[in-house]
C-alpha cells in the first residue's frame, strides 16, 4: 500500500488521530495545519472532562508521534487552495506561508524571543490574547514542530523595514531567513480526510452579558488558559493579580438560541463548565460557584456522575439564563430569574464565565467551496446519520468538530470511522 497517499487537512485531535491510524495501515500521509503547530483546541485546554486528565499530557505524545512517523509528512502554516478531481484521486494546490526561520537549523533555544524588540508587545492568540509575545516566538512550549517562527505582521523589519534585527545577532545557527517567500505546492492524493475543527461564538453581541465591556467577564476558553500551567498566570487563577473567590458561569451562550440563529446544542459546554467548577474547587478552597443553565446535558460515559459530583461538592446550579450582568463597586452583579422558584435573584460575583457555543471553523466555508462539499444549515460539513464521515464527494471524508459539535471521545471515534471509510475507498 506504500504508493497510496492521503491528505489530512487540520492538525487537531481529529486530524492527528486520522493521520496516525492511516500511517499504521501503511498509507503515506501529508498533514496540513494552517497554524504554526499541530494540537488544535485540545492543546489549549488545562484538563479534560470527565476524568480531569491533563490535556497536554495526553495529547503531546501523539503530536510527537506525528512528527516522528516516517509515513507522515507534516506541513504547518499550510492550507489547500485548490482541489480538482483527477481519475479516482485529487490534484491539490497547497499554499505554504513562510516561517522566516529555517527549520533544519533552528534549535529552539529561544534567544531570539528574548532579544526581539517586540517582546511583550504582541497579543498572543494561543492565550486568547490574555498575554503578550514577541514577533519571533514558539506558540507554546510543547509545540510540534519545536521550531520558532516570525509573525510577519508583528515583525518591524518585515512589516516596516525598520529594525536592527537583534534576533539575527543572537541566533548562533543562523536560522533566521528573511528571504523565505510563500510557496505553492502541487500534489496528487488518492483520498482526503478533512478535519478543520471549530470556532466559538463571539459573545460581544450579547451586550447584556458585558463581554468586552466589563472587567471580569471571560469566555470558557479564556478561563482554560487562565487555569493552564502554560497560560498567562502559570496556572494560578488570578485576574489583575488578585485571586477571585466568587464565580458565576453562564451556559448555552450562543447555543440553543434562536436570536443567534444557532438552535443546536454545542454538546461540550455543560461538561466543560462542570470541569471548570471542579478545577476552581481544587485550587481555591473557599470559592463560591454558581452555574446558570437551561437544562444540563450529561449524555456521555461518566458525565452524569461527573455533574452530580460537581453539585455535591458545593456548586450551586440555577435554572435560568441571566438577563443582565452589571458593574458594582465590589465587582459584578448577575440578575437572573430562577425558573424553579420563579424568583428574581441578584448574585454578587468577581468573575463571570460564558460557556460560548460551537461554530464551524471560519475557513470551513472556503474549504467547502474549493472541494464542492455540501454544508448543513449551520455551516458544518454535511454528513448523514448512518455514515457520519462520508461527504457528498466520493473519496473525501470528514471527522471531528468539522461536521458538528463533539467532545474529544466522539472526535477520536469519528476519526477512526473516517479512516475505515477511507481505507474501504482506497481498496476498491
Ligand atoms: C472551552 C472548551 C473546553 C473543552 N473541554 C473539553 C473537555 O474537557 N473534554 C472534551 O472531551 N472536550 C472538550 N472540548 C471539546 C474539544 O476541544 C473538541 O472536541 C476537540 O478540540 C475537537 O477537535 P478537532 O480536531 O475536531 O478540532 P480542532 O481542535 O479545532 O482542530 C482543528 C485544526 O484544524 C486546523 N485547520 C482548520 N482549517 C484548516 C485548513 N483549511 N487547513 C489546514 N488546517 C486547518 C486548525 O488550525 C486546528 O489546528 C472543549 C472545548 C472548548 C471550547
Ligand atoms: S531561530 Fe535561532 S535563536 Fe531563535 S530559537 Fe531558533 S536557533 Fe534559537
Ligand atoms: S527583526 Fe526585529 S521585530 Fe523582527 S523578529 Fe527580529 S528583533 Fe523582532
Image: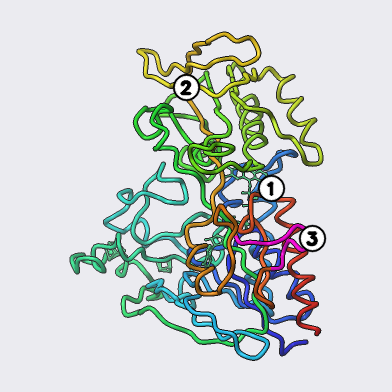
Callout 3–callout 1 Cβ contact below 8 Å: no
Q: Which mark is residue 386?
A: 3
Residue pointed to by mark 2: 323
> What residue is rendered at 26% in x and 69% in y?
158
Tally the marks.
Answer: 3
Q: Position of residue 95 (x, y in %)?
A: 45, 77
> Which residues fall within the magenta stretch?
381-390
Q: Nearer the viewer, residue 404 or 60?
A: 404
Q: Residues within 10 Å of mark 3 (few under 14, many from 20)?
A: few
Do we see residue 248 in this rendering?
Answer: yes
Q: Position of residue 315 (x, y in %)?
A: 65, 20
Callout 1–callout 2 Cβ contact below 8 Å: no
Residue pointed to by mark 1: 407
Q: Nearer the viewer, mark 3 or mark 1?
A: 3
Please tell me whether the stretch drawn in magenta is mainly helix, strand or loop. loop
Please give left or right for residue 364 compared with residue 62 in the image: left
Q: Position of residue 71 (x, y in %)?
A: 69, 79
Q: Nearer the viewer, residue 425 or 68?
A: 425
Looking at the image, is mark 3 or mark 1 earlier in the sequence?
3
Q: Residues within 10 Å of mark 1 (few under 14, many from 20)?
A: some
**Secondary structure under the numbered disc 1 in the rendered image:** loop
Amino acid at each position: 500500500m506504500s504508493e497510496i497517499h492521503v491528505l489530512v487537512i487540520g492538525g487537531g485531535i481529529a486530524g492527528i488521530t486520522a493521520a496516525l491510524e492511516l500511517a499504521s495501515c501503511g498509507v503515506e500521509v501529508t498533514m496540513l495545519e494552517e497554524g504554526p503547530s499541530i494540537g488544535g483546541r485540545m492543546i489549549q485546554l488545562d484538563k479534560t472532562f470527565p476524568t480531569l486528565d491533563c490535556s497536554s499530557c495526553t495529547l503531546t505524545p501523539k503530536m510527537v508521534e506525528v512528527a516522528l512517523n516516517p509515513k507522515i509528512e507534516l506541513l504547518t502554516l499550510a492550507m489547500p487552495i485548490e482541489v480538482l478531481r483527477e481519475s479516482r484521486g485529487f490534484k491539490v494546490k497547497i499554499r505554504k506561508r513562510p516561517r522566516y526561520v529555517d527549520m533544519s537549523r533552528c534549535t529552539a533555544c529561544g534567544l531570539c524571543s528574548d532579544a526581539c524588540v517586540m517582546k511583550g508587545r504582541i497579543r498572543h492568540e494561543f492565550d486568547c490574547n490574555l498575554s503578550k509575545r514577541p514577533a519571533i516566538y514558539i506558540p507554546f512550549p510543547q509545540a510540534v514542530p519545536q521550531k520558532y517562527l516570525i509573525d510577519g505582521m508583528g515583525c518591524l523589519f518585515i512589516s516596516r523595514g525598520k529594525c536592527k534585527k537583534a534576533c539575527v545577532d543572537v541566533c548562533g545557527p543562523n536560522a533566521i531567513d528573511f528571504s523565505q517567500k510563500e510557496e505553492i505546492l502541487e500534489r496528487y492524493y488518492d483520498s482526503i480526510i478533512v478535519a478543520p475543527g471549530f470556532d466559538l461564538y463571539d459573545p460581544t453581541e450579547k451586550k447584556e452579558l458585558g463581554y468586552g465591556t466589563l472587567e471580569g467577564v471571560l469566555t470558557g476558553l479564556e478561563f482554560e488558559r487562565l487555569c493552564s500551567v502554560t497560560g498567562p498566570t502559570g496556572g494560578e487563577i488570578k485576574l489583575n493579580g488578585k485571586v477571585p473567590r466568587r464565580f458565576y458561569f453562564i451556559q448555552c451562550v450562543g447555543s440553543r438560541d434562536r436570536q443567534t440563529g444557532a438552535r443546536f446544542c454545542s454538546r461540550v459546554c455543560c461538561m466543560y463548565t462542570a470541569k471548570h467548577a471542579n478545577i476552581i474547587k481544587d485550587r481555591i478552597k473557599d470559592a463560591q460557584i454558581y452555574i446558570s443553565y437551561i437544562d444540563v446535558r450529561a449524555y456521555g460515559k461518566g458525565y452524569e456522575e461527573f455533574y452530580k459530583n460537581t453539585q455535591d461538592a458545593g456548586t450551586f446550579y440555577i435554572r435560568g439564563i441571566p438577563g443582565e450582568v452589571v458593574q458594582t463597586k465590589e465587582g459584578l452583579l448577575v440578575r437572573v430569574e430562577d425558573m424553579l422558584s420563579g424568583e428574581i435573584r441578584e448574585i454578587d460575583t468577581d468573575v463571570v464565565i460564558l460557556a460560548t457555543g460551537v461554530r464551524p471553523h471560519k475557513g470551513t466555508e472556503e474549504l467547502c467551496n474549493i472541494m464542492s462539499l455540501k454544508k448543513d444549515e449551520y455551516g458544518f460539513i454535511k454528513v448523514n446519520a448512518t455514515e457520519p464521515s462520508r461527504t457528498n464527494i466520493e473519496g473525501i471524508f470528514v471527522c471531528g468538530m468539522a461536521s458538528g459539535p463533539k467532545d474529544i471521545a466522539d472526535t477520536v471515534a469519528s476519526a477512526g470511522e473516517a479512516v475505515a471509510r477511507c481505507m474501504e475507498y482506497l481498496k476498491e
